[in-house]
Amino acid sequence: MIMKKILVALAVLASMQTVDAQVKAVVDARKAVESAEQAAQNPKKAAKSATWMKLAQAYVNAYDAPTANVLGGNKQELALVMGNETPSSVEEVVIGGVTLEKNVYNGKNLYFDASGALIATEVTEPALEGDPLAKAVEAYAKALELGAKAADVETGLNTVSEKYFQEAYNKYSLGDPAEASRLFGLAADAASLTPSHRVDTTSIYYAGITALEGSEFEIAREYFTRAHDYGYYGENGAVYANLGSAALGMQDTVAAQNYLEDGFSKYPESGQIMTNLINLYLATKENPEKLISLLDEAKKQMPDNASLYFVEGNILAQVKEYDRALEAYRKAGEIDPNYEMGYYGEGTLHYTRALEIQEEAEALPVQEYQKYDELQEQLAATLKQAIGPFEKVFGMTKSDEVKQVAADYLKRLYFLFRDEKPENQEAYEKYDAFLKGE
């Protein structure tokens, strides 16, 4: 019993020492800033670049102090570096539809996902009021002005930029996209102030993405325009799609159409741009044939590009021009027999058409049973037409994801016709086993 009391006392003492050490780190950081600020106010010392470099570093250290011992990516790793510092409370919170575990510590909150991975860090008691990173930027600028080594200032400002970026990610993870956008913008600004004037297009683009998510459309358009002007277009021209979304958010349909048409002319294979443009045309009653005309221009430049015909098929399918869509999908297969997406488009077209026939049949009055029977025959025939194309996709694709989707369609199709012949039951079992990983 005595030994147990001693162990408990030691554990409590260790925990207190860890917390005390953390508090001391914050206090020491404040004292360092006070000392460095006093030096910067001394006329003789203020004339030296080293004084401002030291002040800048003191501000950065003060920013870091509350979470200085938060290292590692999960609870187990954190336990090693945080010692016996334990949370004062633990609760579940739902952020953006995701359940996280919130651990409340002295001066900070840590958020973990279901696997125990650290998702975000939130400082509740900063070492300094205001924005110490902004003060660090000013100090680095003054140091450079007084002749500090460009390489040292470059390193310092890049560090500040990285910390803004991480803080932006924290805010986004905690459901505050508007604040995340502001911080991503500050990350880009800090990078631009380096002696090399580094252009941080990633931060600029993310500032736009988070502003768009936060419905700050004007800010989003400004950042996407900056990214575009620096030659950063995102994956498959996504910046054009996002510029269009920002303009639509500002009720500027003319600008939105210009952005999207420009993007489509450069990235005709972008599903995001194409979908946004079709929806805009439908909303503004613009003729979707205009999109086909844009695509035809791309075909002249790339006549052997089968994917352009797949895109054409998708456009026509969305506006229910099914016969023309089918021709486009099959043309993709003619140009490149190894291009599975043409077959995939054909399969999904038949499947979509079948769902429409089913809805039409279900909407009929009871007395129209003859029409109902006719539609049921059309439904079965249309569903069977989808099997062949999906079989080709399954057999030829090298994409695991596409193979999984094709197998899922085939499983459902063969299940519907499993009683017609033994081969259908066998095919159903084959694709069911495949999807189960057997």
Image (cartoon, rainbow, N blue to C red):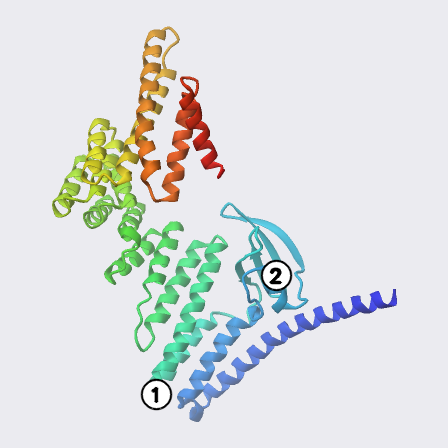
Query: In the image, what residue type sits under mark 2?
Result: Gln
Q: Which residue extends farthest right?
A: 1
Q: Is residue 65 left or right of residue 395?
A: right
Regarding mark 2 in the picture, which secondary structure is present there?
A: helix
Quarter holding residue 50:
bottom left
Quarter holding residue 184:
bottom left
Regarding mark 1 in the picture, which secondary structure is present there?
A: loop
Counting from the top left corner in percent of width and height, residue 120 is at 52, 59
Residue closest to the eye, 381 or 182: 381
Rounded to the nearest whole Å, what is the CA distance between mark 2 and mark 1? 45 Å
Counting from the top left corner in percent of width and height, residue 183 is at 41, 63
Counting from the top left corner in percent of width and height, residue 117 is at 55, 56
Q: Can residue 142 be seen in this view?
A: no
The residue that label 2 is drawn on is 76
Q: Which residue is drawn at 26% across and 51% down?
A: 240
Residue closest to the eye, 251 or 424: 424
Q: Which of marks 2 and 1 is nearer the N terminus?
A: 2
Query: In the image, what residue type sits under mark 1?
Result: Gly
Q: Can residue 268 be seen in this view?
A: yes
Q: Which numbered circle lies on residue 147?
A: 1
Q: Which residue is drawn at 48% across and 55% down?
A: 173
**Above or below, comparing residue 22 to residue 97 in the picture:** below
